[in-house]
Structure formats: C-alpha cells, structure tokens
C-alpha cells in the first residue's frame, strides 16, 4: 500500500498555538511528514514557519520570550479598526526569514482569514506568506484588519478555527487536526495568579505608556488611569483584554465543534493546556511539551492511518 498524502490542520488559539511546534516535531520524529499544511491564526504562523524551513528559528525565539519582549511587539494605534497595528509582527517574521511567496514553498500551504465585509472564509494560497499570516491573526478588537486584494481581512478563527476542509480541498487524503480550543474553558483566573508584580509592571511601563500617547491630550490623564485596567485582571474581575479574548475563544470553541462534526479529521490532536491564558506567550516550553505529548498518546491511530490507505 502507498502512503496517503497527509494534511495538517493547525487551529487557532493565541498563546496555546505554541503547542503546534511540539506537534510538528513529534510527528516528524514518528516518521509522519505532513505534505499539506493549513493554518488559522497562530496555526498559520507556526505552519508558515514549518513550510519555509524556519520552525527551529521560531521555536528558539519563542523559548526565550519574556513579557517585556511581548509588549515590545505590540505597536499601538487606536485608529484603523484595532488596538494593535501589527507591523512589528510582520517585521519579526522577516527577521526570522518567514518571508517566502506561498506558491514557492515546498509544501502546499494556506492561511485562513475572514472577509470583514461579507463574512466569507478566505484561503490565502499565494503572495507573501508573512502578510497572509498577518491577515489570519487579525483578532477583532485587538489587531487592525488587513487590506488584501480590495478586501479587509480579519482572523480566520471566526469562520474556520481548525481548517480540516481546506486540507481536503488541497488534496490531503488523511487529515490530522490540532484543536487548541477544547479545554480552554474553566474557572476564571486573574493575571495576578500567573504573573508576578514585576512582570505586570513591565507591561504597564512599556506598553500602556504607548497606549496613553495615542489618546487625545484633553482626556489623557483620565485615560492613563483607566488603561492599566484593560490588561490587568483581579481575583474578582477580568480585565478588558482577558474578557475579550475569552469571549472570542468561547465563540471559536463552538464554531470548532460544529465544523469538526460536519468535517471530521481522521485524527484530532488536543494538547492539554487547561490553565493557559490567551496572553501566555512566555510559557512556550510548556506548550511545546503538551503538543508533543498529545501526539505520543495518539500514535496508534496516527500510524494506522498513515501506514497506507485504509
């Protein structure tokens, strides 16, 4: 029996998306080499690094991330449809050399986005891969939408958080899906539960000062007092950012369940990250390990499907 062509559908999930790195490494270690890669939001970033041969560079960068560096990537602009402009994310991808034209990559790749005007699902399969990823990660209310071929694009997680259907459309005979949203709901955790005071202070000084500079001078003093509450949660009350990202995560979880019920993957991998907040990008090592562990648990099913056509 010939081996089937394997498609890898990497789902959305903010900081949980680092688990995709562990998944890909564990699959390759087991001798399973995806031939098609489709990604949504953070899944598109990791998928782009993989198909351009820069996964190890991205892993090294993520492993060393601190909150101060994360704040440095957030270029604030309160106009343009989002809090974050996103140009520094694109610049980071260029530094990591995740910059190829999609059509020149050795494996078929697609990043999933959403048309802001029509709500249609958009598959980005050509042009600069860094700009495709930037469109796919445009979380509403946080990142500004991206203009692409006369359309305004936002996060693909609004329509297809785990793009199994896209892998099939590109020719995958066996689809492995990575769902990051299945165990994200649970008791509310404040940011103070996971971050030290020094770390939170670092965010406030480096990032919130930039937020304040974008506010009209007449109300800047009042706004500066309010700004820290956008990102800092307390044991009794979530902050604005946490409430927004959790709300979107709930929505994406429901969409994922519906899409996977109608378009099931052959194997669905679920990294176990129940206490991972949306902003926990500084915990990449834990996410890598969770991604590798879920592959290890699923190896019997994976080998049955990829050994030959079944």
Image (cartoon, rainbow, N blue to C red):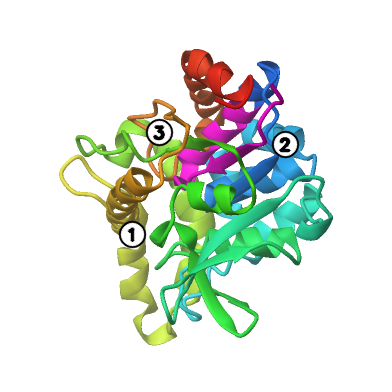
- In front of the other: 240 or 218: 240
Taking the image as drawn, is residue 273 in sight?
Answer: yes
Q: Give, as a single range, the part of the protein colored magenta.
A: 1-24
* Numbered badge on residue 196: 3
Q: Is residue 247 above or below residue 227?
A: above
Crowd rating for badge 3 (residues with CA inside 10 Å; few <14, some 14–19, many 20+): few
Q: Position of residue 102 (x, y in %)?
A: 76, 58
The residue sitting at the front extreme is 1
Q: Position of residue 3 (x, y in %)?
A: 69, 26
Q: Is residue 196 above or below residue 84?
A: above
Q: Quadrant of the C terminus?
A: top right
Q: Which residue is mark 1?
A: 230
Whichever of callouts 1 and 2 sits on the residue coming sooner in the sequence is 2
The residue sitting at the left extreme is 236
In the rendered image, residue 15 lying in the magenta stretch gets the answer yes
Q: Secondary structure at mark 2?
A: helix
Whichever of callouts 3 and 1 sits on the residue coming sooner in the sequence is 3
Q: Position of residue 277 (x, y in %)?
A: 37, 39
Mark 3 vs mark 2, CA separation in Å: 30 Å
Q: Which residue is mark 2?
A: 55
Circle nearer the viewer, 3 or 2: 2
Q: Secondary structure at mark 1?
A: helix
Quadrant of residue 62 in the image?
A: top right
Crowd rating for badge 1 (residues with CA inside 10 Å; few <14, some 14–19, many 20+): some
Q: Position of residue 183 (x, y in %)?
A: 31, 33
Residue at left offset 44%, top offset 45%:
13
């Amino acid at each position: 029996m010939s081996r089937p062509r394997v498609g890898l559908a990497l789902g959305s999930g903010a900081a949980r998306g680092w688990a995709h790195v562990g998944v890909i490494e564990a699959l390759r270690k087991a001798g399973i080499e995806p031939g098609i890669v489709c990604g949504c939001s953070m899944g598109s970033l990791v998928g782009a690094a993989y198909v351009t041969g820069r996964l190890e560079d991205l892993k090294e960068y993520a492993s060393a991330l601190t909150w101060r560096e994360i704040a440095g990537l957030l270029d604030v602009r309160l106009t343009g449809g989002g809090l974050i402009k996103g140009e520094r994310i694109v610049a980071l991808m260029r530094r990591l050399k995740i910059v190829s034209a999609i059509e020149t990559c050795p494996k078929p790749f697609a990043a999933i986005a959403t048309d802001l005007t029509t709500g249609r699902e958009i598959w980005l399969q050509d042009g600069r891969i860094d700009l495709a990823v930037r469109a796919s990660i445009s979380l509403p209310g946080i990142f500004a939408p991206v203009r692409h071929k006369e359309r305004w694009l936002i996060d693909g997680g609004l329509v297809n958080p785990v793009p199994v259907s896209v892998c099939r459309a590109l020719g995958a005979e066996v689809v492995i899906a990575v769902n990051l949203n299945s165990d994200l709901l649970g008791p509310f955790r404040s940011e103070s539960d996971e971050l030290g005071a020094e770390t939170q202070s670092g965010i406030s000084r480096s990032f919130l000062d930039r937020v304040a500079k974008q506010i009209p001078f007449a109300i800047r003093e009042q706004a500066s007092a309010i700004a820290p509450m956008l990102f800092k949660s307390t044991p009794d009350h979530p902050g604005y950012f946490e409430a927004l990202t959790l709300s979107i995560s709930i929505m994406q979880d429901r969409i994922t369940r519906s899409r996977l019920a109608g378009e099931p993957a052959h194997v669905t991998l679920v990294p176990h990250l129940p206490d991972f907040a949306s902003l926990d990008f500084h915990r990449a090592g834990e996410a890598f390990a969770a991604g590798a562990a879920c592959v290890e648990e699923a190896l019997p099913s994976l080998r049955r499907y990829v050994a030959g056509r079944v």
